[in-house]
Image (tube, coloured by chain):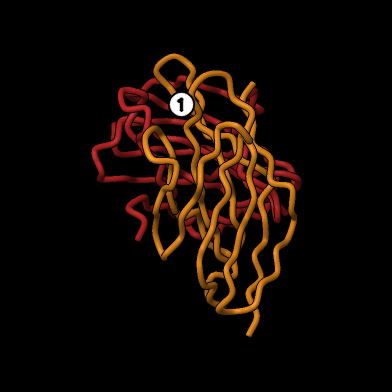
């Protein structure tokens, strides 16, 4: 079974500082990994994904993620946090069943950016 | 901005009512999904339709009945729900597994309260 783990329930960072939200994965075969963000009372917004290729993936709103095969990690990063980045972040892995696919999410990490 | 539209945004229903949640996408996607999300928890997959056929049913109780009338529409029919079914219901769409890196896009969700 495929899974992702987000070890931190909450990450606190000051505005202007770099941020990291951690994710590790357990997948048989090639991993297809995603990051989504959820603002309060909203749906999920896609940030970025890793399929193959460069280990550093760039996404929306200045976010990037580093795929590390040896550490089975896919951490989300941003060089300079904004208060508006405060939200719930989900790491997810995509699996396949026949012609259908499914996303399995981590437990989520709440990012709090303060002035 | 999401191109997956869900209606209604909020729904309050009694345990004996029959109601439906609706979802529409115009991205030409041939896979559509229903997820359920409880507060502060990750989304959980309920159903997947691939090419308008039900491909995945994650052992969802029969009081939830999905329907995919065409490739752009997805409904979730609700009947005899329980208060514990109160949650955010998220619709999503993507291309099917023909492209393994295809992104799954989510709507803003429908907030369901069962009284």
**Residue placed most toward the observer, A17 or B4:** A17
Q: Give coordinates of residue A81: x percent, y percent.
A: 54, 72
Q: From this view, report whether residue A80 is shown above or below residue B30.
A: below
Q: From this view, report whether residue B36 is shown above or below residue A42.
A: above
The residue identified by callout 1 is A101
Instruction: Point out the residue furthest to the bottom here.
Output: A115
Q: Which residue is at 56% across, 43% downward?
A: A74
- Circle 1 SS class: strand
Quadrant of residue B75 within the rendered picture: top left
Q: Which residue is at 36% across, 56% downward?
A: B2
Quadrant of residue A105 within the rendered picture: top right
A103 sits to left or right of B50: right
Q: Give coordinates of residue A26: x percent, y percent.
A: 64, 28
Label 1: how many Cα within 10 Å (few below 14, some 14–19, many 20+): many
**Residue placed most toward the observer, B14 or A57:** A57
Q: Give coordinates of residue B95: x percent, y percent.
A: 32, 32
Shown in orange, the chain is A
Q: Which residue is at 53% across, 57% downward?
A: A37
**Residue placed most toward the observer, A27 or B65:** A27
Q: Which residue is at 49% across, 50% downward?
A: A65
Q: Give coordinates of residue A18: x percent, y percent.
A: 57, 68
The C terminus of chain A, quarter of image:
bottom right
Instruction: Point out the residue furthest to the front here.
Output: A70
Shown in red, the chain is B
A57 sits to left or right of B64: left
The N terminus of chain A, quarter of image:
top right
Q: Chain of mark 1?
A: A
Q: From this view, report whether residue B113 is shown above or below residue A70.
A: below
B16 sits to left or right of A15: right
């Amino acid at each position: 079974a495929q899974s992702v783990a987000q070890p931190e329930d909450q990450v606190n960072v000051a505005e202007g500082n770099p941020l990291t939200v951690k994710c590790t994965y357990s997948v048989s075969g090639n991993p297809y990994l995603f990051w989504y963000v959820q603002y309060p009372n909203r749906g999920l917004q896609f940030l970025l994904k890793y399929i193959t290729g460069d280990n550093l993936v760039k996404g929306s709103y200045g976010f990037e993620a580093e795929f590390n095969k040896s550490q089975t990690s896919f951490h989300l990063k941003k060089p300079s946090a904004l208060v508006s980045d405060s939200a719930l972040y989900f790491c997810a892995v995509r699996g396949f069943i026949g012609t259908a696919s499914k996303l399995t999410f981590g437990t989520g990490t709440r990012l709090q950016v303060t002035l | 901005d999401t191109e997956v539209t869900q209606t209604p945004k909020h729904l309050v229903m009694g345990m004996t009512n029959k109601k439906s949640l609706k979802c529409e996408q115009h991205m030409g996607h041939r896979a559509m999904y229903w997820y359920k999300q409880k507060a502060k928890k990750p989304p959980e997959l309920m159903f997947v339709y691939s090419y308008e056929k039900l491909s995945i049913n994650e052992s969802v109780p029969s009081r939830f009945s999905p329907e995919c009338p065409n490739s752009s529409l997805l409904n979730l029919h609700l009947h005899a729900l329980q208060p514990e079914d109160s949650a955010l219901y998220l619709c999503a769409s993507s291309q099917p597994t023909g492209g393994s890196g295809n992104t799954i896009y989510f709507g803003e969700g429908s907030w369901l309260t069962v009284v």
